[in-house]
Image: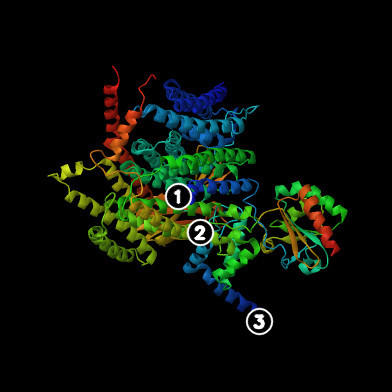
Amino acid sequence: MRAIKAWKWTLPLAIFAVVVAFLYVGLSRDPREVPSPLIGKPAPQFSLAQLHEPAKTLGSADMKGRVWLLNVWASWCVSCRVEHPLLLELGKAKIVPIVGLNYKDKTPEGKAWLAEHGDPYTVSIVDADGRVGIDWGVYGVPETFVVDKQGVIRYKQIGPVTAEALERKILPLIRELERS
Amino acid sequence: MIPELGHFALILALAVALAQGIVPLVGAARRDANLMAFARPAAVLQFALVATAFGCLAWSFVTSDFSVLNVAEHSYSTLPTAYKFAATWGSHEGSLLLWLLMLAGWSLAVALRSRNLPAPLLARVLAVMGVVSVGFLLFLLFTSNPFERLVPAAPEGRDLNPLLQDPGMVIHPPMLYMGYVGFSVAFAFAIAALLGGRLDATWARWSRPWTTVAWCFLTIGIALGSAWAYYELGWGGWWFWDAVENASFMPWLVGTALIHSLAVTEKRGTFKSWTVLLAIVAFSLSLLGTFLVRSGVLTSVHAFATDPARGVFILLFLALVVGGSLALFAWRAGAVGGGGGFAPISRESFLLANNILLIVAMAAVLLGTLYPLFLDALNLPKASVGPPYFNFVFPILMAPLVFLMGVGPLAAWKQAALPPLVTRLRWALAVAVVTALLLPLAMGRWSPLVACGLFLALWVVAATVTIVVHRLRSAPQPTLIAKLRANSAAWYGMLIAHLGIAVFIVGVTLVSSYEVERDVRLDVGESIELGGYTFTFRGVEPKPGPNYRALAGTVDVLRDGKVVNTLKPEKRIYAASGQGMTEAAIATGLFGDLYVALGEPVSETGVAGAWGVRVYSKPFIDWIWFGAFLMAVGGFVAIADRRYRIAVTRKAAALAGARPA
Amino acid sequence: MTVRRFVATLLLVASAASAQPATDLAFDQRIRKLEEQLRCLVCQNQTLADSGAGLADDLRREVRTLAMSGKSDDEIRAFLVARYGDFILYDPPVKPRTWLLWFGPFALLVAGGVIWMVIVRRRRDGGGDDSPSGLLGSDAKARARAWLDEEPPGV
């Protein structure tokens, strides 16, 4: 009983220490980031018109059997310009097909943007009303998804693709997925 | 020149604060009167320096000195002068300076109004406040300097956030900070007691008025914030359980527990170590709130621009101050503790229940606020905790407390008997139950939640009436006036504050259950019915403002065919930022508000055609803030109690007599 | 009129008729209540009902479409959670990782009750150093002690 009595005075300090520990960890987290629940789940089905050839469509079924990237972009998106040089390099290296999802944009403006900044995409498709974006859990632009040969989403990059993310996460993952 | 003067004043203030923090503490430990006497002039000087710094920043804003970075980022040349002044605290750096000014102000007040405090106690109290000032001054000077220059000076500022260009902005932060920071006084008293190893009823008597005043200001500050959100944000809400709202509410809950606990310590010399802990926790929550807003750890509508480096600094400061205090508590609380016994049914036991319930409520709010962070830190899938959670948990925890509010004041100290209490209160209980069951029908729709809420509110009112009647009946004085005068201001203050809670609960209950909203497209001349009124949209016309362009709508409000009011909601675009804002138009009434806001133009004819209009009926919503106002009034009345003033004169006279001539 | 055009006209009429629920007050209020419990992912301090963000518009349209096709509130929530995670719900679901959140306060309440009983029992059995109030109440005694302990200034 004496032990409990003496111990109770330190309880507030102990509780506080736990709270501070969590706050410290919290400093390195981003509370605004919304992690995707689709990692490890099959990519949502879609079938959309292509940007450069509106008469043709591209569907999720067409990409089966290959590892590929889906990059969500728009001509009105400022951050997209930040990641664009990296995407161009990636596209030139022809490591994986990159499908561009032109999100909530106007086709003429989208085409003009690609003409001005370069086109890294194997194919670009048009999601004018954002419906397909919703299915993929898109909540901001740009976002990039890595999809494996079976059509399962394996990684989502929230925000612009950075050199670090490419080196540390995306490229190693692609290599691993290509092997399987 | 002026900004540099302000900067220099802050540096000097840091030196003074360091001295204020160290010298009197040494003096108190050594019983050296000269060292202890250093505290008061140091506090006065520190206030003068901080006030000077604040004045310099305010001057820079009012004169639109865009060579100061802070002014260039948060002001505009055509901003109305009142808002230019308010912009002084419209940024992270400026609001920290306001924090510091409040802290220095409270230190000054303690220094000037404590002639009757024993020297060691006063020395320690001011020293602790000095130490806290040191932390804030270091933070300001090293990471958040408001006087940083912009070279070359900007030709024009980037404007104060339009949401903040409002009378509420002028008054809400100062009030809130007065309260938030005011708990530092109770905190300092608690630390002083732990350091001195002695805590008695007179300690409680000294710290009680300071704590109550801080609590009053915090009450007003929170209420103003809520009212401001209501009429400024344009969506008719008044409380969102946002992280920063919670950050101000948690100290309020603990502060409420503290003023009740102090009552017990003052009257009966018991609950001592518990009261000390509450004082530490209340101010710790104030500091935690400061951390949460500025560190980027939680998303909040209030969050200032965040910077991880700042976050680490504040967390370190928090860990040192709070951790140090709690360590001191762990070490010394046993020495100050102890206290008398009391019966299971007694005023003490009811107040103990009050305290426990308030702490549990605070813990629930803290849990909900930090839970998303908790999950993220453990790499678990993220969740959001919002109003549905808090609105469910909090009322359940508070209901028993509100019920006890009717019983506690009737119970005698040390020992009370239950049967007489029950007998005295059965009339109040009956009235409350019957009225609560019937009133919802008068509002048009019966609901069990409304009945519960109304029961609690009416119970408090009926029980309070019972308390007053009982007190007057058993009073020995011959006349009613004499009987009324025989009661202390503290007693009346308690009654008013408790009634304030009842009024608040009525407002919350009725508006939550009976508010109605319609979001419709209205052509010019078209009407919509809501809450017994007809709202007719008369179109929109341009209206220029000092630093914005507006489209002002006109909506006629009719009842029984006659126009009873004309509301003018606006849609504004601010010149500097291009930011848009919705200004709602509100018809305030005793029994409810009518609230109209413009959406967007929805026809091909653009702004001259049809618009989306949101119309709300908010029954009894103003009772929420009126109730809070009553609570604060009750607090102020309680402080006016003679015993806080007489104690000064009696003791001073006694000391004067005892001192060698 | 060809069969095709006839069917097309029929469909047109049918769709106009099914557009009726869009103006139904109860339906609107149900949608609004649902949207008030969802978080906007762009303006993260606003509900989906109140936010002016583009994504909020899209999601509100989605919610309405789902509701009009007969989905229940739970199904609509499940749809959104499948795409955005629990983060989009302001009402955190009761799962093992939120047990502490949902049951914690009530556990604390019970614990508080227990603590209250323990303290009250201890104090009733005469815990503490309070002497029965004689001529001097504990308050006045403490003041006397304080005056006696004070050193005259100047020492």
Q: Are marks 2 and 3 on the same chain?
A: yes
- Residue B392, x across and y down, in percent: 46, 60
Few, some or many C-alpha atoms within 10 Å of disc 3 (few <14, some 14-19, many ≥20)? few
| Chain of the residue under the numbered disc 2 shown in the image | C
Three-letter code for the amino acid on which mark 1 is drawn: Tyr
Q: Which residue is mark 1?
A: B230
Which one is closest to the eye, mark 1 or mark 2? 2
| Chain of the residue under the numbered disc 1 shown in the image | B
Q: Which residue is mark 3?
A: C1
Q: Is residue B376 left or right of residue B340?
A: right
- Image point (41%, 52%), residue name: B356
Three-letter code for the amino acid on which mark 3 is drawn: Met
Which one is closest to the eye, mark 1 or mark 3? 1
Q: Is residue A119 left or right of residue B283?
A: right
- Image point (57%, 32%), residue name: B140
Which one is closest to the eye, mark 2 or mark 3? 2
Q: Residue furthest bottom?
A: C3
Q: Which residue is mark 2?
A: C104
Q: Is residue B259 left or right of residue B128?
A: left
| Chain of the residue under the numbered disc 3 shown in the image | C
Q: Are marks 1 and 3 in contact (CB under 8 Å)?
A: no
Q: Of the numbered discs in the image, which one, if any, rests on residue B373?
A: none
Q: Nearer the viewer, residue B235 or B416?
A: B416
Mark 3 falls on what kind of element? loop
Mark before the other along the chain sequence, 2 or 3: 3
- Residue B557, compared with residue B645, is above or below; it is below
Q: Give the distance between the C-alpha atoms of the residues marked 1 and 2, in whole angstroms.
A: 31 Å
